[in-house]
Image (cartoon, helix red, strand yellow):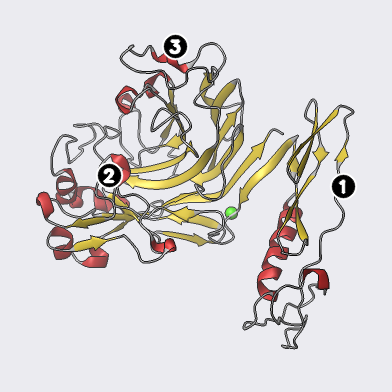
Amino acid sequence: MSSNIRLLVLVLGLAGVLNSQQNCQNIGDIQVFYDPTCAQGGPGCNAGGQGELFNFYPPCPVSTTTTTTKSTTTTTKSGSTTTRTTTPSGPTTSRTTRPTVPGGCVTEEPEIWENGERLVFYDDFDFLDFNKWRHDLTMSGGGNWEFQLYHNNRSNSFVKDGVFHIRPTLTEDRIGEANLRSGYRMDMWGGSPADACTGNNFYGCERTSGAGGNILNPIQSAKITTSTTFSMKYGRVEVRAKLPRGDWLWPAIWMLPAKNVYGMWPASGEIDIMESRGNLNYPSSAEGGVESFGSTLHWGADWTQNRFHLTHEIYTHPAPLSDEFHVYGLHWTEDRLYTYIDDPSNVVLDVDLTSQNFWELGQFSDVYENPWEGAGANAPFNDEFYLIINLAVGGTAGYFKDGVAGKPWTDKSSSSANEFYAAKNSWYPTWNNKDLDFEIDWVKAWSFQ
Ligand SMILES: [Ca+2]
């Protein structure tokens, strides 16, 4: 498996080198091919990187082959994509072709099967791959008036030694405390597509410190998503991660609907694989701190009617989840959705998607329309969702409960961020530890077909 992935990465990397006109590099012993049917670009480099003018490209793909080891095979075609499925699922190999070069040359992405499941997304974080992830850029606070802003900055999101880190920092360290407090206009609108603010709700793209008496978002952090690159319907997700330790940190691994086919949140659902509190001493009666995490489905006929408490479970570990890496998993079929830690047998949240539909489960008032009318018992969890990894701080939606563990702000206050920041001496020292970062070793997703 891993060698195939490395090969794919190698070929993609090679294409980048060979298509460059200016940055010829010595590519050593890597074999390259001259293929006139693929030659579309300008002058490239020769194999030794000496700068002679030839167009070298990775080899055109070899012929498509499909191997199945079980006898019952069905074939479906959709456009140029051919998929062969063995029933029941067993070790199979199939390939998908797609044109990538004008003129008909195609490249193949080998399909990788593991235990009868097809790998559809994989990132080992050898580098921060912007073809897989995009950063949110916003001060909107997740709709919860959380205290962080999200931006695309290697101080807050970076790869080191094959591990992706999200590290919270103080905004005052970038703009100064006086600017944090008053008269400083933070503009995240951006000037190009890659810079563009991703969330303007709740004044997410532009704020001025001191307006309304509030400081700017006092924390800088990061949120990455596959919203524009990858989504999936049914399958399995695993994320190997080490949770952050520090008061009022709120790390999460979750999924949102790619298309909102049943309407706005939470009508189209939300799948929270893992969310946790970074506090070391947070009472279990309030669902625990860094030794615990929650798995939750959010769904409802209206944002005021979110019935998440009916599909919510807490897992508590014998030790802080910041001490070691663990695998946080989701197994999602048409009939059942469950989350787990480390092994699929360690089930956390388990939701039967067949016994009743979510309209019945939620017992909604007739005041509301059923957004899932005629859509199947598992709606809204029957469409594409994309992946999200983020580290939030604080907020006023009740995730951190008023009066618990010395929480220095109240949710109903009109200046909760000020209250949080005024108590910096109580929480910032807890961030001064080697486990502050939210660390992700890898992310994998499989399809069952
Ligand atoms: Ca890794």
* Amino acid type, mark 3: Glu
Q: Do the residues under discs 3 and 2 have CB atoms within 8 angstroms?
A: no
Query: Relative to 405, is 155 above or below?
Result: below
Q: Return the x and y of residue 108 as percentages of the image width and height.
A: 76, 55
> Is the CB atom of the residue marked by disc 2 within 8 angstroms of ligand 1's nearest atom?
no
* Amino acid type, mark 2: Glu
Crowding at dot 3, Cα within 10 Å, few <14 / some 14-19 / many 20+, comes out as few
Quick one: SS at disc 1? Answer: loop
Q: Earlier in the sequence, mark 1 or mark 2?
A: 1
Disc on res. 65: 1
Q: Do the residues under discs 3 and 1 have CB atoms within 8 angstroms?
A: no
Q: Assign the C terminus to one quadrant of the image.
A: top right
* Amino acid type, mark 1: Thr
Image quadrant where residue 22 sits: bottom right
Q: Nearer the viewer, residue 318 or 33?
A: 33
Q: Do the residues under discs 1 and 2 have CB atoms within 8 angstroms?
A: no
Q: Quadrant of ligand 1?
A: bottom right
Q: Earlier in the sequence, mark 3 or mark 1?
A: 1
Query: Relative to 34, is 61 above or below?
Result: above
Q: Nearer the viewer, residue 435 or 275?
A: 275
Q: Return the x and y of residue 13 as percentages of the image width and height.
A: 67, 67
Q: Who's the residue at 34% across and 63% down the image?
A: 190
Q: Which residue is labeled 2 in the image?
A: 146
Image quadrant where residue 321 sits: top left
Q: Which residue is labeled 3 in the image?
A: 360
Q: Which circle, 1 or 2, is nearer the viewer?
A: 1
Query: Relative to 109, is 263 above or below?
Result: above
Q: Can residue 337 be seen?
A: yes
Quick one: SS at disc 3? Answer: helix
